[in-house]
Amino acid sequence: MESINQNLKPLTVKINDIGNLEIGGCDSVALAEKYGTPLYVMDEDTIRGICRDYKQAFKNYSKVNMMYASKALCTMATAKLIASEGFGFDVVSAGEIYTVYKAGADMSKVLFNGNNKSYDELSLAIELGVGRISVDNFFELALLNEVAKAQNKTVDILLRITPGIECHTHEYIQTGHLDSKFGFDLTQIDEAVELIKNDYTNLRLHGLHAHIGSQIFETSIYGDEIEILVKEIARLGLNEINIGGGIGVKYTENDCPPSVYDVAEIIIKRLNECIEKYNIEPPALFIEPGRSIISTAGVTLYTVGSSKQVPNGRKYVAVDGGMSDNVRPSMYQAEYTAQVANKPDAKNFEKVTIAGRFCESGDILIKDVELPELEEGDILCVYNTGAYNYSMASNYNRVPKPAMVLVKNSHSCIIVTRETLDDLISHDRLN
């Protein structure tokens, strides 16, 4: 059964009666004119649709807890929307904790993750009632116990482990193999458990947490992860496992991510086998999708500017954004798909390279893409930019960050305002 993460475009994309791309019932060219470009556009129906795919896929395991991985995109509006679908949140900073709190999330359904949490961040998490803290290392165990003791609280925790599983993805987004900055090695678990039992009495251990990577297309490794986690919690007498997220999405026609339904079938089947094998009660299962929830729902609109034909070489076409609003092509060599929003049906194709506006030779959004002949003022729509675009955006070259709009039923609303020049200097101080 197919799921929305296997789509290249948002559910509501179509060509309207005047020949422009339409998203959420809104003309994309009109959106660009109204709000300016670059512009992040998020389709509400697509976000809700993939949330419901996940809930439907895992409905046969009653003790499942869906936790949206906020690092993919964290705004108050998207948090409120995803919370309304019954999801909790995996957060990795005080900023993400505060954002979901201000969005009205149920903080008991929030898990705080990360490899170097500060005293202040841990204090905030406890004060705001975060439901679980995933402890990453021995230093944090001691620090968290100190913070909890100072607040006279007992804190519910998981231990994050590195299960020794290496998935075939970009090396920067592999997190489950042994040589990783994240988590306890399997050989360190017993020592950590003993410290919690004997010394860190303000901590209450419930289970284990692992994350094996991001943009994952392999499905069998989830079964391997389940086996490792269940074997360990059975040995330790614990009752929760958090398997992370990482299911991939479709950035180009060459990408073939797995269906959420297929992954769920593998996870539930192996989990039931392990429950029987290790003779334990069914544990609570936490899963943390991020990219696969939000990426497909998002597009970025740009306005075309200058162009350059290299003699006997590439033709470069520049847009009014680039690596400050989408660093992934420069950072990960990520590939994207684009369409000309104001002439999606045009046939006069040529091969061009879409360049950003920033002062770096590596500021290239899409290399060697076939598009209708581009002219100054055209609106370029780049698909699948909902995840890790706004969340990794910067002010490089002192350029303001773009606005973000949410679209549904022919209505658009600003959910992140465009930064102004005064915003850029608002934290500067003159001597």
Image: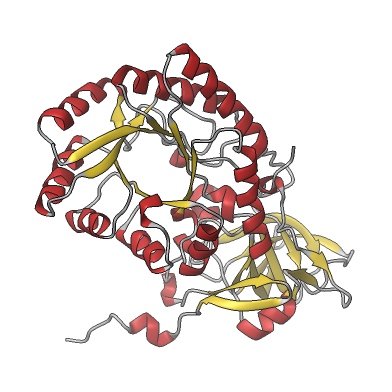
Rendering colour mode: secondary structure
Residue 140: percent from left, percent from top: 20, 42
Residue 420: percent from left, percent from top: 45, 84
> Quarter holding the C terminus?
bottom left
Q: Is residue 282 above or below residue 381?
A: above
> Quarter holding the N terminus?
top right
Q: Residue at x 26, y 34 (%)?
A: 205
Which residue is the extreme one toward the top?
Answer: 277
Q: Is residue 378 visible?
A: no
Residue 209: percent from left, percent from top: 37, 34
* 85 lies left or right of 1: left
Q: Residue at x 72, y 69 (%)?
A: 24
* Quadrant of residue 241 within the rendered picture: top left
Instruction: Work out whether residue 299 or residue 360 is closer to the camera in this orientation and state it.
Output: 299
Residue 166: percent from left, percent from top: 47, 27
Instruction: Work out whether residue 349 or residue 35 is closer to the camera in this orientation and state it.
Output: 35
Instruction: Work out whether residue 349 or residue 112 is closer to the camera in this orientation and state it.
Output: 112
Q: Is residue 59 visible?
A: yes
Q: Residue at x 66, y 32 (%)?
A: 262
Total numbered badges shown on the rendered structure? 0
Q: Is residue 269 above or below residue 28?
A: above
Q: Is residue 29 above or below residue 74?
A: below
* 372 lies left or right of 10: right
Q: Residue at x 21, y 87 (%)?
A: 430
